[in-house]
Amino acid sequence: MALTEVYWDHHIPLPKLAPVQAKVTVALVALLCFINSYDGDFVFDDSEAIVNNKDLRPATPLNNIWSNDFWGTNLSSNSSHKSYRPLTVLTFRLNYLVAGGLHPVGFHVLNIILHAVISALMIDVFAVLIGGLAYDEKGRILNHAPKTSLLAAIFFAAHPVHTESVAGIVGRADLLCALFFQLSFLTYCKAFNKGRYLTRVLLFSLLLCAAAMLCKEQGITVLGVNAAFDVLLICNVNVYELSQRLLLRKKSFDLVRMGLLTRLGLMGLGGLLMLYARWRIMGTGPPAFTEVDNPASFAENIILRIVNYNYYYSLNAWLLLCPWWLCFDWSMGCVPLIKSATDWRIVWLLLLWCILVGLISQALCSQDSQRRRTLTLGLVLLVVPFLPASNIFFRVGFVIAERVLYLSSAGYCLLLAYSLGHCCYHNKKLLCVMVLALLCVYVVRCALRSHQWRSEQSLFTSALSVCPLNAKVHYNVGKNLADRGNTTPAITYYREAVRLHPTYVHAMNNLGNILKEKNELVEAEQLLSKAVSIQPDFAAAWMNLGIVQNSLQKFEEAEKSYWNAIRFRRKYPDCYYNLGRLYADQNRHLDALNAWRNATVLKPDHSLAWNNMVILLDNTGNLGQAELIGREALRVLPNDHTIMFSLANVLGKLQKYEESEGFFLHALRINPNAASCHGNLAVLYHRWGKLELAKKHYELSLKLDPEAPGTRDNYNMLRRKLDQLKRSTP
């Protein structure tokens, strides 16, 4: 263990601050970089993980978070992503409870605070990794590299690659994982206070590791960092010298006497138990990813897989080195595969390995123990947390993901601070300018990128210049435009998504939907037919194809499409609703009623299905049954004005005028500008003999909709009757 100050620390152009001042400074830098994301919307993956995740709702049993994945799907389901992060979901649920609903500000603020806390704690982590482990008389860690650790922590706080983890709410998983990762490491350090290690503290460190893993799977990698720290700092093992001794069969270090093997054994056993528990929880095995998610992992040639994996590593390294080109998604053609030795991009992976080999040789072979320790532990912190995302142990569901670099960036920041302090000490002015310029660039880039993450429109649009070949980027831009009603430009982006990725069934489905709304039914049918031929179990596309075929009066084909949709998604109330409309168009009234009843069973608040049942029974003269269905619907949806309107019409025909009037008036209190409701209420009063009230509501209806069918004729008929009454009055 090093007990003297690191010799290059005084070259760092920063003041030597007290521990509390240093942590406050780093936290303020973190807040400055990301504070403008505090009032952003729910964007991208937030929709599935938070907005549509029932596990956040107070009505959902709390136990569900322990049996469901990060997205709210049961882990035993084949469609589950297998991302088991119950502690992260628990914090989302707490956000929901505190805010009283889905208000994104509270979610964003907590993310920013977590990043500030993690950044401040990084000073303690860097202090140990750079300056060694030593304690004062009060048991506090002594910082023998106060300036270097402060600079590295500031770089970490301001690194733009963290924007996805901080400004994107689902990045909470990375933040909480990093927090427990730090606490596990610092607790492990505490186990060696006063020159001896305490087993109970080591076990508590393992418990914190388990907590990190319950926030995100990457958390288990802290065991690797703890082991490296133990070997290199506690036991002061020179890895190069140890390997030479083993190769030459010379006497090795007494690792048993040092207790290292016991500690490594405990950590190894703990890690294996966590992995076993994780595997059992996954239920049906690992998640199934497609070639679109990670094309390199599907390459038939193992050499090509290795080359492309290493190219991905070089791109990740570039994002750490130059985090200017950032994108929310790097899949679907964003990074084309390297398929031949003549591809110029191979230069990048060769350059990466040249740099890594150079760093590793310095880390292992340098005669300077401080340099050797700092470089080795910096590389460990850079590489080990990245291993779960490396495709080495299992296939991952992405090409590049900026969020997985959150922990690895700490190792990069440590190496960067070391490089600046060690390589530029001959010219302090140059070093000062370089540090200041780099920090300014980082802060500006963080602010710009955080602003882009505030809304889906700006986030998706920003990706067009970074990944113009990414079909998913064009799809998301188109979807965002369509959701805001801008269907014409949305069509352009959907077409480009299909051009870039000809088997992109979701883009075909959405494009087909828009063309259906624009009455371009033939092309819509072609697109949707192609989508279901590519992915036969795509239930939504089958349903939309049925709607288009129904509009084209291809009733038999439409019915088959609807039943295919239901076959692939048994609980599909919207499909039953559309099937009911098809049957109604064919005058198959009983089949229509059964289909709509199925829709309401699967989704009790399906207003359209309830209303259509009432209207169909009304139109076929089954007024008593219509009344019963209407009343049943209002017990489920007591404030649905459309059902009140339909039930009021039925009650009027049954001459239950007072009840009918009550429902009409209640519906108008909810929706006072409904011309049809005023018109039908006027008809009720007309029948009832309340002619002045009828006149009033006819006039209100015509004011709201002068072209309302039948209302003008009824109004004129009423006026003639009123005129006759006036003339007959003496």
Image: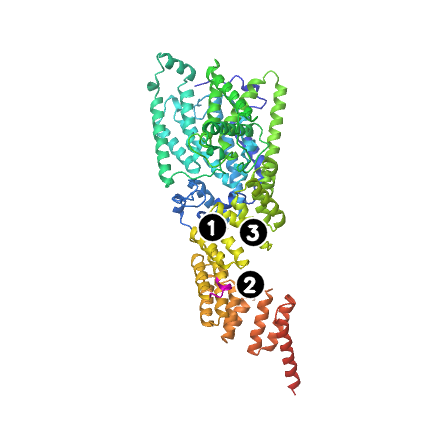
Label 2, secondary structure: give it. Answer: helix
Q: Are marks 1 and 2 in contact (CB under 8 Å)?
A: no
What amino acid is found at the position of numbered circle 1 in the picture? Ala
Q: Which residue is mark 2?
A: 670
Report the front residue among 726 and 142.
726
What residue does disc 1 label? 539
Which one is earlier in the sequence, the residue at label 1 or at label 2? 1
- Dot 3 amino acid type: Ala
Distance (Cα) linking label 3 and label 2: 37 Å
First-in-chain label (3 vs 2): 3
Q: Disc 3 designates what residue? A: 524
Q: Nearer the viewer, residue 531 or 566?
A: 531
The mark lying in front, picked from 3 and 1, is: 3
Between circles 1 and 2, the one closer to the viewer is: 1
The percent position of residue 149, horizontal first and vertical second, equals 52, 25
Q: How is the image coloured?
A: rainbow
Amino acid type for the residue under numbered disc 2: Ile
Q: Secondary structure at mark 1?
A: helix
Q: Residue at x 62, y 30 (%)?
A: 440
- Magenta segment, which residues? 583-588
Left or right of 258, for residue 559: right
Choose the circle earlier in sequence order: 3 or 1. Answer: 3
The quarter holding residue 231 reads top left
Residue 28 among magenta residues = no
